[in-house]
Image (cartoon, rainbow, N blue to C red):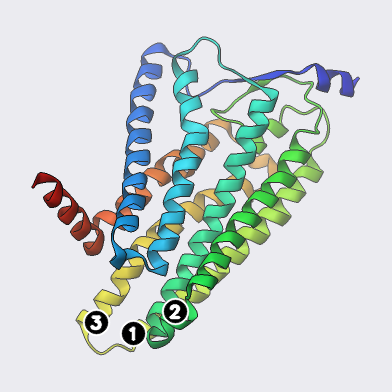
C-alpha cells in the first residue's frame, strides 16, 4: 500500500508564504528586488576579482567561490518562489522537488565549508604573514575549494536519495516555500527517525567541523591581534575579519537551528522565517558585507567606471 501511494505521487504543492492576495504581491516585489540585488551584487564581485590582478589572491579566490555559490543557491529557490507567489498552480513535480532539494542542500553545505576555509585563510594571513604566499599557494587553494564542493554535493546526494525513497501518503501539500527535508518528513507515512539521524550525523559533522575550524582559527587570530602594540594595527587586522565573522554568525546560526534540533520543535511559520534568512537574505548580504566596505574592491570599481566614462 505504501509503495503504491509513493509511486502514484507525481507532484507536490508548495503552500508558499501566504495565501492573502495583497501580501502575495508584496512578497513578490520584495523577493524580486532581493533576487536582483543578489545576482547583480555577487556577479559584479566575481567580475571585479577577475579583471583586477591585485585582487587575484587566495582571499578573493574563495570569496569568488562564495559569490558563485550564492548566485546558484538563490537561483535554485527564489525563481520558484516568484512563480508560485502569483500563480494559481503552485505544484512542483516529484523530480523537480528532488532536484531543488539536492542543489539547495549541496550548495548550503558547500557554503558552510567555504566559510571555514576562509577563516583558515585569514588565520594564515594574520598569524603567519611571511609564509602566507607559500602556505596558501594555488594548488592548496584549488584543493580546498574542490574539496568543499565535493563534500557538499556528496552529502546532498545521500540525503536526497534517502528522502525521496520515503513513501509520501499523508498529503502532497508541503507547508513551505521550497522543498526542504523537515517539512517533507512530515508528509511521510513511514517513521523518519533514520533520516533525521542521518541529518544529525552528516550535518552535525560538516557544521561542527566547519564551526570548530572557524573557532580555532579566530582564537589564534584574536590572540595574535591582541599582541599588536599599535591600536591602528589592531584595527586593520581585525577589520579584515569582521565581515567574515558577521556572515559566519548569521549563516551557521540559522543552518544549525534548522537542521540540528529535536523533531518535536518543528514550527512551520518559524521555520519559514529562518529558511528565508539563509536561503534568500544571506546570499544578498554577502557581497554587500564583503565588498562595499572593502577599499580594494571599491577602488577597482571606481577605476572601471572611470575608464568606461572616458
Please state if 232 lies on the left or on the right of 237 as rendered.
Answer: left
The answer to whether residue 186 of the structure is visible from this angle is: yes
Of badges 2 and 3, the one in the foreground is 2
The answer to whether residue 256 of the structure is visible from this angle is: no
Q: Is mark 2 on a helix, strand or loop?
A: helix
Label drawn at residue 162:
none
- Expressed as whole percent of the image width and height from the top left, the position of residue 66 reads 45, 54
The residue shown at (70%, 52%) is 200
Of badges 1 and 3, the one in the foreground is 3
Q: What element carries label 1?
A: helix
Measure how far apart labels 2 and 3 are at the Cα level. Answer: 17 Å
- Image quadrant for the N terminus? top right
- For marks 1 and 3 on the same chain, the one whose residue lies earlier in the sequence: 1
Q: Which is nearer the eye, 144 or 303?
A: 303
The residue shown at (36%, 46%) is 42
| Number of marks in the rendered image | 3
- For marks 2 and 3 on the same chain, the one whose residue lies earlier in the sequence: 2
Query: Relative to residue 28, is residue 218 depicted above or below?
Result: below
The residue shown at (80%, 32%) is 166
Label drawn at residue 124:
2
Disc 1 packing (10 Å; few <14; some 14–19; many ≥20):
few
Disc 2 packing (10 Å; few <14; some 14–19; many ≥20):
many
Q: Residue furthest right?
A: 1
Q: Which is nearer the eye, 164 or 227?
A: 164
Label drawn at residue 226:
1
Label drawn at residue 233:
3
Query: Relative to residue 186, is residue 52 depicted above or below?
Result: below
The residue shown at (69%, 42%) is 263
Please state if 206 lies on the left or on the right of 158 as rendered.
Answer: left
- Expressed as whole percent of the image width and height from the top left, the position of residue 207 reads 60, 59
Query: Relative to residue 117, is residue 149 depicted above or below?
Result: above
Q: Is mark 3 on a helix, strand or loop?
A: helix
Amino acid at each position: 500500500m505504501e509503495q503504491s501511494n509513493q509511486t502514484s505521487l507525481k507532484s507536490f504543492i508548495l503552500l508558499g508564504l501566504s495565501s492573502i492576495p495583497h501580501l502575495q504581491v508584496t512578497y513578490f516585489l520584495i523577493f524580486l528586488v532581493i533576487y536582483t540585488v543578489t545576482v547583480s551584487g555577487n556577479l559584479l564581485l566575481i567580475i571585479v576579482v577577475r579583471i583586477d590582478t591585485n585582487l587575484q589572491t587566495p582571499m578573493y579566490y574563495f570569496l569568488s567561490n562564495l559569490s558563485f555559490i550564492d548566485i546558484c543557491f538563490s537561483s535554485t529557490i527564489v525563481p520558484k518562489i516568484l512563480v508560485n507567489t502569483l500563480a494559481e498552480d503552485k505544484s512542483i513535480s516529484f523530480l523537480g522537488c528532488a532536484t531543488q532539494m539536492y542543489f539547495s542542500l549541496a550548495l548550503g553545505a558547500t557554503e558552510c565549508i567555504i566559510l571555514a576555509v576562509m577563516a583558515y585563510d585569514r588565520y594564515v594571513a594574520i598569524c603567519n604573514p611571511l609564509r602566507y604566499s607559500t602556505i596558501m599557494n594555488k594548488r592548496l587553494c584549488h584543493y580546498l575549494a574542490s574539496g568543499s564542493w565535493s563534500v557538499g554535493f556528496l552529502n546532498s546526494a545521500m540525503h536526497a536519495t534517502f528522502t525521496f525513497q520515503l513513501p509520501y501518503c499523508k498529503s502532497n501539500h508541503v507547508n513551505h516555500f521550497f522543498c526542504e527535508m523537515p517539512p517533507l518528513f512530515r508528509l511521510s507515512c513511514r517513521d523518519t527517525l533514520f533520516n533525521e539521524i542521518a541529518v544529525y550525523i552528516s550535518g552535525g559533522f560538516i557544521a561542527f567541523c566547519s564551526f570548530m575550524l572557524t573557532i580555532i582559527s579566530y582564537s589564534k587570530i584574536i590572540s595574535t591581534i591582541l599582541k599588536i602594540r599599535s591600536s591602528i594595527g589592531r584595527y586593520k587586522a581585525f577589520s579584515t575579519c569582521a565581515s567574515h565573522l558577521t556572515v559566519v554568525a548569521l549563516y551557521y546560526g540559522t543552518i544549525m537551528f534548522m537542521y540540528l534540533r529535536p523533531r518535536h520543535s518543528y514550527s512551520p511559520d518559524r521555520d519559514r522565517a529562518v529558511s528565508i534568512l539563509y536561503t534568500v537574505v544571506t546570499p544578498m548580504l554577502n557581497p554587500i558585507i564583503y565588498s562595499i566596505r572593502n577599499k580594494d574592491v571599491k577602488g577597482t570599481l571606481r577605476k572601471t567606471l572611470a575608464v568606461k566614462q572616458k
